[in-house]
């Protein structure tokens, strides 16, 4: 009996942390179902796109006229388009471009907007100049500016990213500037000035960390908008050139045969919609967690 008790105690201790983590995870899911649902949907879509070479049943660009406009079946789960290409394969491969565009636009927009917003909010002279430039950029509709930039340059993923980043920067700048204007009057900033802390160190050490939480939420919404923006540009014919598969280009090509083959538009539209929905759910959940007023109510 003594030996049995000695062996069972370490086993009980090893399972206790696992049960504790599972309990915390279950409690987190109950308190923040938006994040859990959004993360689950987004993880599945990202996994499908990342594993496209392994799980896509066909070459997304392989044309097969004998199989054109075939309805969903065992051979083609999402049917085929007007060129006989497998819609499922095109949707899976198209997600890679759309997701990369969304993530890249969010990172560049937040990074550039944060740098400009910090300087504009902390320096009155820079604020007078930079914010007038941002106001002029915001006066132009974002999608029209993106279309003009893409139309004037060579169509590529870099051009699409650049065209979508430019309209988002002023929105991030205004958000960061508003936070910096309130933070620069706080006692901890006055204390940093009193001890001789340099301007750039005050921004990096004391101001910037306090802007991270709202920027994380803003980045999720920018990512969702960028995925939609790429779809808009591809749908209008000024996105990535064919035969590159994106959700927007698949929908654009499918609209010509929508009356005969609704599945060509339906499935990429569902993937696009669920991706944007999942990102927005994550953003709403993060806002609830990071907002002190909302977190106290939970």
Image (cartoon, grey):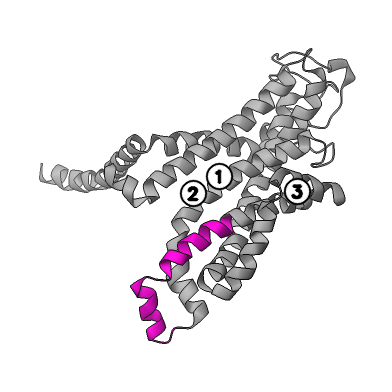
Which quadrant: the N terminus?
A: top left
Secondary structure state at the residue bearing disc 3: helix
- The answer to whether the residues at label 1 and label 2 have Cβ atoms under 8 Å apart is yes
Neighbour tally class for label 1: few under 14, some 14-19, many 20 plus, Cα within 10 Å: many
Neighbour tally class for label 3: few under 14, some 14-19, many 20 plus, Cα within 10 Å: some
Q: What residue is at 62 percent from the left and 56 percent from the top?
A: 170
Q: What residue is at 41 percent from the left and 82 percent from the top?
A: 193
Front residue (pair 50, 122): 122
Which of the 4 image quarters holds residue 88? top right
Q: Earlier in the sequence, mark 2 or mark 3?
A: 3
Mark 3 or 1, closer to the camera: 3
Q: Earlier in the sequence, mark 3 or mark 1?
A: 3
Would residue 81 be visible to someone looking at this image? no
Instruction: Measuring from the top left, give residue 40's x and y in whole percent.
Output: 49, 35
Which of the 4 image quarters holds residue 50? top right
Where is mark 3, residue-wise? 145
Residue 174 is inside the magenta segment: yes
Where is mark 1, residue-wise? 221
Where is mark 2, residue-wise? 217
Instruction: Measuring from the top left, give residue 231's x and y in whole percent.
Output: 71, 37
Left or right? Give the position of 265 relative to 152: left
Secondary structure state at the residue bearing disc 2: helix
Q: What residue is at 28 percent from the left and 43 percent from the top?
A: 297
Instruction: Measuring from the top left, give residue 148's x and y in whole percent.
Output: 81, 48
- The answer to whether the residues at label 3 and label 1 have Cβ atoms under 8 Å apart is no
Magenta region, residue range: 172-197
Would residue 231 be visible to someone looking at this image? yes
Q: CA distance from mark 1 to mark 2?
A: 7 Å
Front residue (pair 82, 125): 125
């Amino acid at each position: 009996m003594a030996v049995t008790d000695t062996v069972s105690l370490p086993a009980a201790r090893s399972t206790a942390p696992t049960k504790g983590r599972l309990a915390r995870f279950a409690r987190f899911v109950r308190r923040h179902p938006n994040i859990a649902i959004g993360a689950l949907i987004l993880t599945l879509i990202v996994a499908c796109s990342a594993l496209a070479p392994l799980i896509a049943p066909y070459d997304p660009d392989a044309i097969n006229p004998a199989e054109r406009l075939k309805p969903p079946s065992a051979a083609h789960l999402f049917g085929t388009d007007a060129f006989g290409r497998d819609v499922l394969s095109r949707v899976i491969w198209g997600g890679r471009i759309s997701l990369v565009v969304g993530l890249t636009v969010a990172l560049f927009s937040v990074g550039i907007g944060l740098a400009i917003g910090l300087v504009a909010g902390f320096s009155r002279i820079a604020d007078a100049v930079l914010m007038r430039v941002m106001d002029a950029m915001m006066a132009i509709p974002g999608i029209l500016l993106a279309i003009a930039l893409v139309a004037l340059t060579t169509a590529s993923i870099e051009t699409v990213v650049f065209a979508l980043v430019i309209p988002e920067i002023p929105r991030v700048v205004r958000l960061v500037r508003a936070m910096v204007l309130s933070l620069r009057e706080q006692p901890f900033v006055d204390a940093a000035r009193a001890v001789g802390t340099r301007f750039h160190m005050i921004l990096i050490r004391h101001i910037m960390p306090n802007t991270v939480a709202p920027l994380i939420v803003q980045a999720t919404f920018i990512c969702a908008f960028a995925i939609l923006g790429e779809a808009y540009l591809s749908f209008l014919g000024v996105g990535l050139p064919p035969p590159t598969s994106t959700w927007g280009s698949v929908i654009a090509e499918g609209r010509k045969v929508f009356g005969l083959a609704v599945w060509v538009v339906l499935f990429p539209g569902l993937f696009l919609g669920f991706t944007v929905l999942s990102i927005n759910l994550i953003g709403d959940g993060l806002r609830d967690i990071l907002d002190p007023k909302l977190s106290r109510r939970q």
